[in-house]
Image (cartoon, grey):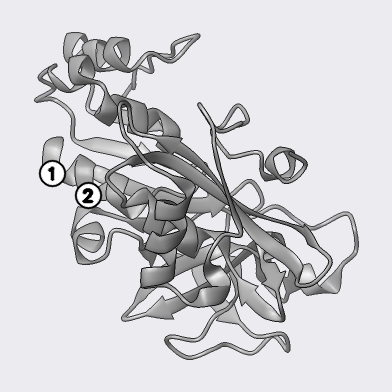
Amino acid sequence: RCTTNLLARRFDSAATMANVARHQARVLVVVPVMLSRIVASDEAMAIDVPSLRVIASSGSAISGRLVTDVLEHVGPVLYNLYGSTEVAVASIAGPDELRRDPTTAGRPVNWVDVAILDDDGERLPDGQTGRIFVGGAFQFDGYTNGDDKERLGHLVSSGDVGRLRDGLRFVEGRDDDMIVSGGENVFPSEVEELLHAHDAIADVAVVGVPDDEFGQVLVAFVVKQPGARLSATRVRDHVKANLARHKVPRRVTFVDELPRNATGKVLRRELSSR
């Protein structure tokens, strides 16, 4: 059976939804920043798309708030795909899993082993955070750098850190994105997830910058919702009221948009150098 794919040279949220309606598309493949722009566009959301059965989101982390918005306003069609170039698709969170917890990466796909391992390569029990390793038929053959820590038997490192809970996988962030501030380990994703849920915040990224006293401190780059009034103090107070003190950004910088690459991933190194 043939499948028709429609590709656009440039992304436009309203034009994308219009094409879904015009061609009665059943599947829409997006990265999270594209999906965020669709949900934020009144014109795009006004277009009826009864044929749509699957919105497949991958390429970067999707916020819990965006997941909830899609499920509420578009319907139970969202699927969050977790994987990488090296391991292909490792797990999928469908509408049922995302309703249980909008931040989950779901369950492993068939014939794929997703393991949470400690520094000795041992599997960790539910709730404990470790490195995510993936084994399956679609992973590539090997790493060129010869780092044995990147491969354990049939398992290959995804480069991420996460945990297992009640059969669902949760990704806490990239291993090399971890910020060590005053001896405490902080993953930016936890702070970003909290700030994404703030009504006045449209987008956010948290990075670590060098500091003489603490080694690193957190800096939050915030994109406000249109017309929102928000101060740096209010942002910091919101984090302080919900997370541990060492997770409060030392500085908050407001920007018009976050720098991203072609697949929608935030360019954290560019932000760290600002």
Answer with the quarter of the image where residue 182 lies.
Answer: bottom right
In the image, 99 versus 55, the foreground residue is 99
Answer with the quarter of the image where residue 117 lies.
Answer: bottom right
Residue 68: image tag: 2
Three-letter amino acid code of the residue under disc 1: Glu
**Horizontal and vertical percent for residue 190?**
47, 64
Q: Residues within 10 Å of mark 2 (few under 14, many from 20)?
A: some
**Horizontal and vertical percent for residue 138?**
59, 53
Q: Secondary structure at mark 1?
A: helix
Q: Residues within 10 Å of mark 1 (few under 14, many from 20)?
A: few
The reply to whether discs 1 and 2 touch (Cβ–Cβ < 8 Å) is yes
In which quadrant is the N terminus drawn? Answer: top left
In the image, 159 versus 230, the foreground residue is 230
Q: Residue at x 30, y 27 (%)?
A: 227
Residue hosting label 1: 72
Q: Residue at x 84, y 73 (%)?
A: 148
Three-letter amino acid code of the residue under disc 2: Thr
**Horizontal and vertical percent for residue 15?**
30, 9
Distance from the alpha carbon under mark 1 to that under mark 2: 6 Å
Left of 32 or right of it: where is 114? right
In which quadrant is the C terminus drawn? Answer: top right
Left of 172 or right of it: where is 251? right
Q: Is residue 84 above or below residue 45?
A: below
One can see residue 136 in this view: no
Q: Residue at x 59, y 40 (%)?
A: 266
